[in-house]
Amino acid sequence: MNTPARADHRSAHADTFVRDHLPAAPLQPDLLLGMPSLRFPARLNCAWELLEGSGTLDRSPRTALLSPHGVRWTYRELTVKVARIFHVLTEDMGLVPGNRVLLHGANTPMLAAIWLAVVRAGGVVVAAAPTVRADRLGEVIDKARVTHALCEWGLRPELESSGRTPRTLSYGDPHADASLERAMLGKPDWSLPVDTAATDPCLIAFTAGTMDTPKATVHSHRDVMAACRSFPEHVLKATADDRFIGSPSLADTYGLGGLLLFPLHLGASTVLLDTSSPRQLARSIGEFGATVCFSGPARYQAICADTTPYDLSTLRECVSSGEPLEHETRRRWKQRTGNSLIDGLSSTELLHVFVSMRGEEAWRRPGAIGRPVPGYLVAVIDGSGRPLPHGEVGALAVKGPTGCRYLDDERQRDAVRSGWTFTGDACWADEDGYLYHHSRTAAPLSGPGLPRDSHAG
């Protein structure tokens, strides 16, 4: 009798540092992958899936990435760039699957191509925004045991000042002798992805760390694709015809999702701005005819306060996250653009937005941040780990297709209890399940948290 083949979950990582330093099994989050769209094969490389594996749309001639500096790459051109960088990484820099690669640069098409190439090669991206200084870069490199670095030429002195010496190649000056662009010349324009397991890590993202030492959060290929099939499909409802734009850094998971992962997943285009000023964002919306914007309340407020007659008429959907969205900001943005802002609660630990609501709902629920994105469950918990009734403030616990995994960090014990991720937010819920943000709270539970089989919603 023939028996069905077992799924192959073996890791492709030759360098097993990240997998070896994940939390112990009892401290791992429970992942909810029951929805058909959230079921993935055992072998999955998200960089391949984002460029070539999704759907039947012929992407090759479509515009993928744009910038204010004249770059306009089609999906075919982006795929060629990614392949050549892949060969530089694996042939010239000695990258093996599982190595950690620091990416240090502003939002540019080249940075996006590098991100995809590292992941396609089985590497683990460790991204740092251009504002990160040498001392913090040193902390990041040490924590993630970074082996390689790809750094913008203008930021190389900062990296060198950190005193760390990963194998480094710079980009952004194609005329320099020792540049990534020079190394790409003559490399093959095609590459098959490394055959990674869906559960293989591909991203280490650091939390902001304003109150304590930053935490390194680990996400897998499956996590990336789960995020792409959650908020953008169920709440944002974007399509391949949309053009994305925004202000957050690709080193931030909110920016990574909104400005790279989601548009590529859909076969849409995205404008990458190398500065995040409200003025450049507003000006570029009109110049590029952007339809979907990802930013935060402060920049939306700044654009509203600027009397310059920017053309914002092409905008269709605008997303806000990162800090509480005040009703006055909603009102002024609606008045200025005709659009209702989509609010969202996101975290580095959960990769992207997990609680949200469309803008039109907000006018009926002043102060609400929304309900769980389809695929996620939430509960409001008291200090002993018991669910609270509607209207009472407690700690927010989340289960879904993504969850918190800190790299080699004792704080995992407070972040995940009984399979639930505790976000550090204090919230309350109304009788219809809409959540309202009360404050940030770092107070750990005194009890064990929710039972694993709880279905709080």
Image (cartoon, rainbow, N blue to C red):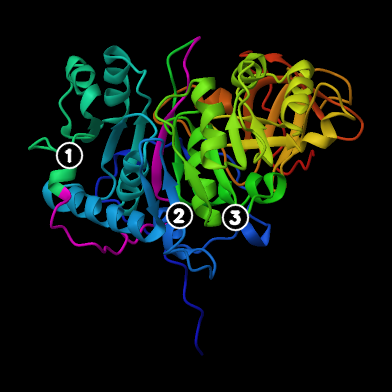
Q: Which residue is rendered at x = 61% and y = 41% of the image?
A: 292
Question: Residue 275, located in which quarter of the rendered image?
Answer: top left
SS type, badge 2: strand
Q: Residue furthest top?
A: 211
SS type, badge 3: loop
Q: Residue furthest bottom?
A: 1
Q: Residues within 10 Å of mark 1 (few under 14, many from 20)?
A: few
The residue where tag 2 is placed is 63
Residue 450 in the image: above or below residue 53: above
Tag 1: amino acid: Pro
- On the question of residue 44 being in view, the answer is no
Residue 194: say if magenta.
yes
Mark 2 or mark 1: name the one nearer the start of the chain. Answer: 2
State how far apart marks 2 and 3 are (Cα).
10 Å
- x, y percentage for residue 7? 47, 67
Q: Which residue is rendered at x = 76% and y = 41% of the image?
A: 454
The residue where tag 1 is placed is 174
Q: Main secondary structure of the magenta part?
A: loop
Tag 3: amino acid: Asp
- x, y percentage for residue 90? 18, 52
- Stretch in magenta: 184-211
